[in-house]
Amino acid sequence: MRSYSYPKNSDDICGGRVELTEKGQLQYQKIYLEVIRNEQMLPILAGMKMVREMYDDLSIEELLILIYDTYPEYRKKSNVADTIDRMKATLAKGLLKRGKIDSDRYENLVAGN
């Protein structure tokens, strides 16, 4: 049986955080300023912001249950899929209660389809 264990805080990649270097931050600023000057890109930026706001509020487990439901092939190499399966009813209920999913998606998650 596989279970999820959180990485050490000293692990900058798997530890749940990735940071841009100073050079990366400058490059981001440059690209962002170019993009916002292009009116055709504004709806795309708005959509990206909406997606980001949706997923930033999820726990790792909540994000994984949605990923595994949408992309079942990701479960194959996962070392935490079994743990997420055992939590799926609780996770789905929390997502529904917070308005992150609708009742149809809730039913689908709980059923495991």
Image (cartoon, helix red, strand yellow):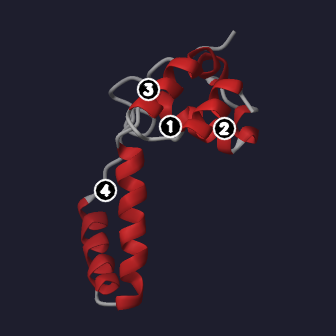
- Residue 93 is situated, as x and y percent measured from the top left of the image, at 49, 24
Q: CA distance from mark 4 to mark 3?
A: 32 Å
Task: Please report contact status of discs 4 and 2: CB closer than 8 Å, yes or no.
Answer: no
Q: Earlier in the sequence, mark 4 or mark 2?
A: 4
Q: CA distance from mark 3 to mark 1?
A: 12 Å
- Residue 97 is situated, as x and y percent measured from the top left of the image, at 41, 30
Of residues 79 and 73, which is closer to you in this image?
73
Query: Which quadrant would residue 41 be assigned to in this image?
Result: bottom left
Which residue is found at the position 47% from the left and 33% from the top? 96
Q: Earlier in the sequence, mark 3 or mark 1?
A: 1
Q: CA distance from mark 3 to mark 2?
A: 16 Å
The residue carrying mark 3 is 94
- Circle 3: residue type: Gly
The residue carrying mark 2 is 69
Compared to 21, does 73 lie above or below? above
- Residue 7 is situated, as x and y percent measured from the top left of the image, at 44, 24
- Circle 2: residue type: Asp
Element marked by disc 2: helix
Residue neighbourhood size for the residue with mark 2, other residues' Cα within 10 Å, grouped as few (<14), some (14–19), many (≥20)? some
Element marked by disc 4: loop
The residue carrying mark 4 is 20
Q: Is residue 8 visible?
A: yes
State the residue lying farthest toward the front.
103
Q: Earlier in the sequence, mark 4 or mark 1?
A: 4
Which residue is found at the position 43% from the left and 26% from the top? 94
